[in-house]
C-alpha cells in the first residue's frame, strides 16, 4: 500500500480535501466491448440530461474549481479532467478509448464529476506527497507534452511530480504492461461524495480488469 500525505500548503487552502485510494493488481487490455457498451450507454444518458453550461455547476466540479482558484490556478484555462471529459460527452464527442483500466476510471469520473488519477503503481518511487505545483516544476502531461503545473494540486514521489487533477503524467501512465494500479479519487467536499464513486470503481475494476489483491483506503488532512 502506498503511503500518501497531504502537505500543509494544500491543506491550508483546501481544508475539506479527502482522497479515496484503490490499489490492485489488474489485467490491462486494449479494449473491452462489454465495458465500452456500458460507457456508451452512460454517455447517451448524460447527453440527454446535461447542458454544457451546467457542467461547472455540478457540486463536485464546482468544489474542485474553487480548490484550483484557492491554489492559484485558473480552472477555465486548465480544466479539471472530470470537467473536460463531461464537456466532450455533452458535445457529442464521447470518451477517448484508451484501455480497459483507464476507460473504467473515466466512466467513474463522468458518473461522479470527480477528477481521478490513475497510475502504474510500480512506476511510483517511494512515498507520495500531495501539494501545490511550483513555478518551473517539470511535468510531462500524458498526451499533452510539457504542462505548467504552478498553482495546481499535484502528486509527487521521490522523482518529482507525477499526477494532477488536470492530466496524469507520461512517467506513471497506465499501459498494457501495467500490473499494479493505483487510482486516487479526489474530493474537496469531504468524505460523503467519495463513497459511491469508490464503490463503482471497485466494481468496474473487478468486473472488467480482473482486479485482485485489492486495497482501499482514505487519506485526509
Image (spheres, rainbow, N blue to C red):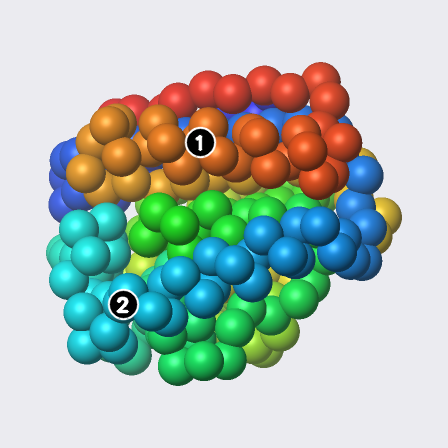
Residue in the foreground of this view, choosing between 5 and 192: 192
| Number of marks | 2
Label 1: how many Cα within 10 Å (few below 14, some 14–19, many 20+): many
Seen in the picture, residue 33 relative to 123 is either above or below; the reply is: below
Query: Is 138 placed left or right of 59 in the picture?
Result: right
Query: Is the residue 73 above or below the residue 35 in the image?
Result: below
Q: Neighbour class for label 2 at 10 Å: few (<14), some, many (≥20)? A: some
First of labels 1, 2 by sequence position:
2
Q: Residue at x 76, y 53 (%)?
A: 32
Label 1 belongs to which residue? Answer: 198
Along the viewing direction, whichever of 109 and 217 lies nearer the viewer = 109
Q: Nearer the viewer, residue 34 or 86?
A: 34
Residue 122 screen position, x and y as percent? 73, 37
**Residue at position x 58%, y 77% from top?**
145
Badge 1 element: helix
Viewer-nearest of labels 1 and 2? 2
Q: Residue at x 52, y 73 (%)?
A: 94
The answer to whether any part of residue 30 appears in the image is yes
Looking at the image, is 189 positioned above or below residue 75? above
Q: Position of residue 182 (x, y in %)?
A: 60, 36
Distance between the Cα atoms at labels 1 and 2? 23 Å
Q: Quadrant of the N terminus?
A: top right
The percent position of residue 84, horizontal first and vertical second, equals 39, 70
Badge 2 marks a residue whose secondary structure is loop
Residue at the spot 71% in from the left edge and 18% down from the top edge? 213
Badge number at residue 154: none
Q: Which mark is residue 50?
A: 2
Question: Is residue 180 in sight in this rendering?
Answer: no
Report if the CB atoms under discs 1 and 2 are less than 8 Å apart: no
Q: Relative to residue 127, is residue 87 drawn left or right?
A: left
Horizontal and vertical percent position of residue 43: 47, 64
Q: Quadrant of the C terminus?
A: top left
Amino acid at each position: 500500500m502506498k503511503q500518501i500525505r497531504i502537505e500543509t500548503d494544500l491543506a491550508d487552502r483546501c481544508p475539506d480535501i479527502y482522497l479515496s485510494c484503490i490499489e490492485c493488481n489488474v489485467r490491462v487490455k486494449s479494449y473491452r466491448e462489454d465495458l465500452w457498451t456500458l460507457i456508451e450507454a452512460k454517455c447517451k444518458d448524460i447527453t440527454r440530461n446535461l447542458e454544457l453550461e451546467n457542467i461547472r455547476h455540478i457540486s463536485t466540479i464546482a468544489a474542485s474549481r474553487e480548490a484550483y482558484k484557492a491554489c492559484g490556478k485558473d480552472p477555465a484555462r486548465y480544466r479539471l479532467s472530470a470537467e473536460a471529459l463531461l464537456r466532450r460527452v455533452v458535445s457529442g464527442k464521447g470518451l477517448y478509448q484508451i484501455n480497459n483500466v483507464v476507460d473504467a476510471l473515466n466512466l467513474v469520473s463522468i458518473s461522479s464529476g470527480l477528477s481521478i488519477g490513475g497510475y502504474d503503481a510500480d512506476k511510483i518511487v517511494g512515498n507520495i506527497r500531495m501539494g501545490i505545483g511550483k513555478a518551473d516544476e517539470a511535468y510531462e502531461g500524458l498526451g499533452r507534452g510539457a504542462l505548467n503545473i504552478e498553482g495546481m494540486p499535484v502528486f509527487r514521489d521521490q522523482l518529482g511530480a507525477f499526477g494532477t487533477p488536470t492530466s496524469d503524467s507520461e512517467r506513471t501512465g497506465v499501459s498494457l504492461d501495467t500490473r499494479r494500479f493505483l487510482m486516487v479519487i479526489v474530493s474537496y467536499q469531504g468524505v460523503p461524495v467519495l463513497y459511491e464513486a469508490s464503490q463503482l470503481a471497485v466494481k468496474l475494476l473487478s468486473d472488467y480488469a480482473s482486479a485482485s489483491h485489492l486495497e482501499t483506503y482514505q487519506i485526509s488532512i
